[in-house]
Amino acid sequence: MNAPFPLTAPCVREADLRQPDEAARIEAFVARENGNLFQRPAWLLGVEEGTGQRATGLLAEKGGEITGWLPLTEIHSPLFGRALASSGFGVGGGALSSSQRIAHDLCRAAEELAIRRSCSGVELRGGDAPSDWDVTTDSHCNFEMPLADDDEAQLLAIPRKQRAEVRKGLKTELEVRVGTSEADRAAHYAIYAESVRNLGTPVFPRALFDAMLARLDGDILTVLHGGEPVASVLSFYHDGAVMPYWGGGTFAARGLRANDRMYYELMLHARRRGCERFDFGRSKTGSGAYSFKKNWGFEPEPLSYASWTAPGAARRDVDPNSQQHAGRIALWRKLPLPVANRFGPWIARGLG
């Protein structure tokens, strides 16, 4: 076990997720406290296995019992620098604790850990943070709503204009396939890689998706036209909710309404699996994805993100909408797909 941090309360220490018993204790704590998917050690370890970014975290304990947990990914990138993220490659995270004081103790310990690891700062994607941290509540929103009781009710729950698009997709000769086979994974990765290239974003390593499917409850839903995959999404299941996480479509998908069909079919599939909620995930406030989710009847819920920057360090900038990256994104969109797929994973594993 690691020694307690010398400058913080003695009950806070760094966790050792490579010890199965330690990881299991934390998994139980996250489940007991209704934590999110990104606070689970399994998420952190999947990220480490798939990208090489180190899984760690800070534990608060009292009398041998866990009272707080801050999941962390130590991200290192030659292009984007070093940082501690809670949680890496996730849209959520932050401290899970029984009190605000413990959450703040964990954040202070994260400051010390960042300095010790030569990181520029700490990024929290949720949870409480000390008042002297930078907090934003207007950059991203989450979208979640209950699933309906049956297929027809689910269709009728979609607002009229978007429902018409789904109906067009239902009338098109499309095949829907769900699984985690090598064929499912290969089809998904090809579609996802093309989709993010078109958005000007490097694709994540295929190993990340494989690692997450191995460690978490997830599957891939793919829509095919004439036997050819045109839209696909890798989703996770956690605490009664389905979360479509990495998805996309080809250029042909839009005209076929394959993406509309895909999300509707995922709603039906998730309900049959026993899910009660559809978590459409986060989107940048005011973005095209933000409007798309509102069109489905989801109400935006502002997210609170916090960050701390080490003294003398520059704040890490991985926001694709920042002016700094505008030229790079425009250039990436023009790359031939084989070139983007070759160099994209090397860049993307450092985004976190």
Image (spheres, grey):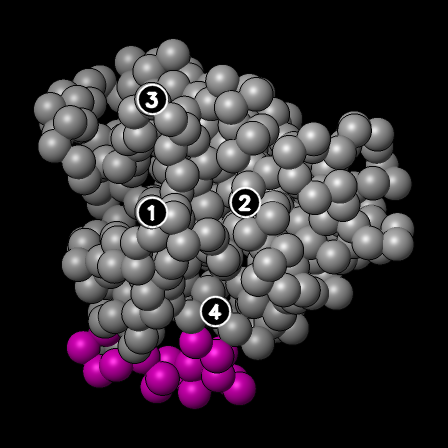
Which stretch appears magenta?
145-162
Mark 2 or 4 closer to N-term? 2
Location of mark 1 (residue): 134
Q: CA distance from mark 3 to mark 2?
A: 19 Å
Residue 237 image offset from top left, x and y in percent: 60, 59
Residue 238 visible in the shown view: no
Horizontally, residue 185 falls left or right of residue 79, namely right
C-beta proximity under 8 Å, tags 2 and 1: no
Instruction: State the image coordinates of residue 233 (x, y, percent, origin top left).
Output: 44, 49
Q: Residue at x 32, y 29 (%)?
A: 316
Q: Earlier in the sequence, mark 3 or mark 4?
A: 4
Q: Which residue is mark 4?
A: 278
Q: Name the N-terminal-most of marks 2 and 1.
A: 2
Query: Mark 2 or mark 4: which is in front?
Result: 2
Residue designated by label 3: 312
User: Which of the 4 image quadrants contains residue 347?
Assistant: top left
152 left or right, relative to 299: right
- Mark 1, residues whose alpha carbon is within 10 Å: few (<14), some, or many (≥20)? few
The label nearer to you, 3 versus 1, is 3
User: Could you give the CA–CA distance between mark 3 and mark 1, rounded to whole angstroms?
Assistant: 16 Å
**Cα distance, mark 2 to mark 4?**
31 Å
Amino acid type at circle 3 is Gly
**Disc 3 element:** loop
